[in-house]
């Protein structure tokens, strides 16, 4: 089960509003101030308690679930069925989000997203995210963080928590929305209005990403466009997908899916969707630019104007560091205890730890015997750590508990002993050649934009269909790494893929791992066994884009008949 907390890019840290939060039922509240010294960051913590209705922190699932039902009825039965559940924070309380609106996020709001998986054994696995919009208030962002902790407690304290910031979401978060996510202006506090299916308002959306897609509303003018991306123009009864001439096939497919979602969510399925690409007639192209207001294909800005699909943050010459979080002196204290490669013995079950990977990811490890104060403050301590280090506010923060560590965490340690990986997302065929407890991972790699750098994103719950013929893919088995080269990969991607894998392995101190190059259609049995199902004929007639266009034409004809 997975639990995510999403926070917008403009959200601040937890504001000190105990009275307001207490009135809303957010009873376990801690106010934190941070200072730094040569020995590390120190955080002073004060607990604010509602004396009329004390909060139980005994982490007994039955007690927590009963209390959750009383305080937040919309959280009742959360995490009991497989799938994704979303709540929006309204007046400091969780309100169930309509399922037909999943994937739409307003930049003035904060949301809680819970993903539940039920394993073959019947056990549940959760990921919990809280998502923060770029214009959400500090109070609302703080409420989302606290509500996430309380929902976590009601599930026994075992979900992994993620802090998500608008436009900088983790790949895991994005993988929950197969048609991508869409940002819209407004929110509860600003009195946003639901879209009237019959209303006419020209809107232009930029579709970014190839695997996990973000759909962002931009100014409806040609200067907002570029040749490397796909764009969706919504003019009411008609929706146009403009295909950038340098966009890739998979990006075009994702744009069509996103346009279909806009049709269904915002227009009750009653709008026609049209594709504008190199096969469109002159009249169709002219109609698109007329609806846009002006312009022509020759006036569309070049590919680089859209920015890279994966923003590469500048990285100083820093190394991953492990910090101990303790309140043995009465005040929370964060002290460095070592640099990579780490030893598992450095983790003390009585404390919490922060692992700074210096790769835009922070892990907060919760020991089984650390006290309630440390557990409750773990995410807030991480936020203060980000401020102390002058890290971007959108830096990914992931909260994990002892004995449920994912491979993404354990890979930073020299060795890892304990229970075999609890959180295997897929049951794949094991072999003695694979690293003990290692979860096979598939990564999508491609060179984007003028930067001529690789963008890399992990693909969760992968299938053979996720192997993109236009790109280079990495299949990491722990003891060996496959470099899969699609038939349509560029010359630059083919020539630089070895350097990419070297950088990837160096980050985890695994430079000596064997590498195997494999070209599309030449996969060995070991490679194929990492996928639930393998079809040797999958790429024989790869015409998904043409099929998608044909399906749209049929949908438009059916709509016209009605």
Image: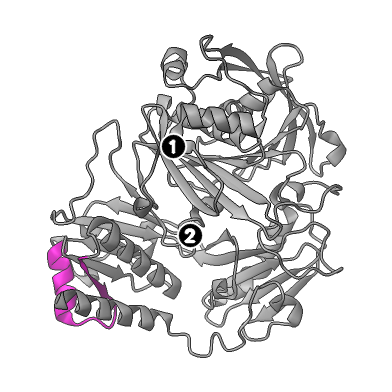
Residue 263 in percent (x, y) is at 26, 62
Q: Is residue 389 visible?
A: no
Report, in whole angstroms, how far the alpha carbon at label 2 lies from the one at label 1. Answer: 29 Å
Q: Is residue 399 left or right of residue 311?
A: right
In the image, is residue 117 above or below residue 164? below
Residue at the image position 73 percent from the left and 45 percent from the top: 405
Label 1 environment density (alpha carbons within 10 Å; few <14, some 14–19, many ≥20): some
Residue in front for this viewpoint, 512 or 104: 104
Residue in front for this viewpoint, 99 or 391: 99
Residue at the image position 74 percent from the left and 55 percent from the top: 506
Mark 1 highlights which residue? 74
Q: Which residues are magenta?
A: 270-291
Residue 380 in percent (x, y) is at 58, 26
In the image, is residue 541 above or below residue 269? below
* Residue 530 placement: quadrant: bottom right
Mark 2 highlights which residue? 212
Q: Nearer the viewer, mark 2 or mark 1?
A: 1
């Amino acid at each position: 089960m997975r639990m995510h907390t999403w926070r917008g890019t403009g959200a601040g840290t937890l504001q000190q509003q105990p009275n307001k939060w207490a009135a809303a039922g957010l009873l376990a509240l801690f106010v934190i101030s941070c200072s730094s010294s040569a020995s590390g960051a120190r955080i002073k913590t004060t607990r604010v308690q509602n004396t009329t209705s004390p909060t139980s922190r005994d982490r007994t699932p039955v007690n927590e679930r009963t209390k959750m039902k009383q305080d937040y009825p919309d959280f009742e039965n959360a995490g009991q069925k497989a799938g994704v559940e979303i709540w929006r924070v309204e007046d400091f309380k969780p309100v169930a989000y309509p399922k037909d609106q999943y994937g739409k996020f307003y930049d003035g709001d904060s949301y809680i997203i819970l993903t539940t998986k039920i394993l073959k054994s019947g056990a549940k696995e959760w990921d919990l995210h809280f998502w923060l919009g770029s214009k959400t208030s500090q109070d609302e962002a703080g409420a989302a963080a606290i509500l996430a902790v309380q929902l976590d407690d009601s599930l026994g304290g075992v979900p992994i928590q993620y802090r998500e910031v608008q436009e900088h979401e983790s790949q895991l978060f994005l993988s929950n929305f197969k048609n991508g996510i869409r940002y819209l202006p407004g929110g509860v506090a600003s009195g946003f209005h639901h879209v009237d299916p019959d209303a006419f308002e020209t809107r232009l959306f930029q579709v970014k990403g190839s695997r996990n897609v973000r759909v962002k509303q931009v100014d409806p003018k040609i200067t907002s466009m570029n040749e490397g991306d796909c764009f969706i123009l919504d003019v009411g009864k008609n929706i146009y997908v403009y295909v950038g001439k340098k966009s890739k096939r998979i990006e075009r497919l994702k744009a069509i899916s996103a346009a279909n979602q806009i049709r269904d969510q915002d227009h009750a399925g009653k709008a026609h969707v049209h594709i504008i690409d190199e096969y469109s007639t002159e009249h169709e192209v002219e109609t698109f630019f007329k609806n846009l207001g002006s312009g022509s294909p020759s006036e569309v800005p070049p590919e680089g104007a859209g920015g890279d699909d994966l923003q590469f943050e500048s990285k100083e010459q820093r190394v991953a560091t492990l910090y101990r979080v303790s309140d043995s002196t009465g005040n929370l204290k964060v002290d460095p205890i070592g640099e990579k490669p780490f030893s598992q013995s450095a983790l003390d079950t009585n404390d919490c730890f922060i692992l700074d990977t210096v790769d835009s990811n922070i892990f907060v490890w919760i020991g089984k015997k650390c006290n309630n104060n440390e557990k409750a403050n773990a995410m807030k301590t991480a936020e203060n750590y980000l401020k102390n280090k002058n890290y971007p506010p959108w830096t990914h923060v992931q909260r994990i508990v002892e004995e449920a560590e994912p491979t993404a965490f354990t890979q930073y340690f020299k060795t890892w002993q304990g229970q075999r990986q609890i959180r295997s997302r897929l049951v794949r065929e094991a072999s003695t050649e694979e690293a003990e407890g290692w979860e096979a991972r598939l990564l999508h790699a491609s060179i984007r934009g003028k930067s001529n750098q690789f963008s890399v994103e992990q693909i969760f719950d992968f299938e053979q269909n996720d192997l993109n013929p236009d790109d280079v893919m990495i299949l990491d088995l722990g003891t060996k790494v496959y470099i899969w080269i699609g038939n349509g990969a560029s010359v630059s991607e083919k020539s630089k893929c070895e350097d990419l894998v070297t950088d990837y392995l160096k980050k985890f101190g695994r430079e000596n791992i064997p590498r195997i190059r494999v070209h599309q259609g030449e996969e060995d049995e070991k490679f194929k066994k990492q996928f639930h199902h393998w079809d040797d004929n999958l790429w024989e007639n790869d015409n998904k884009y043409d099929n998608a266009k044909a399906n749209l034409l049929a949908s438009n004809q059916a709509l016209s008949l009605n």
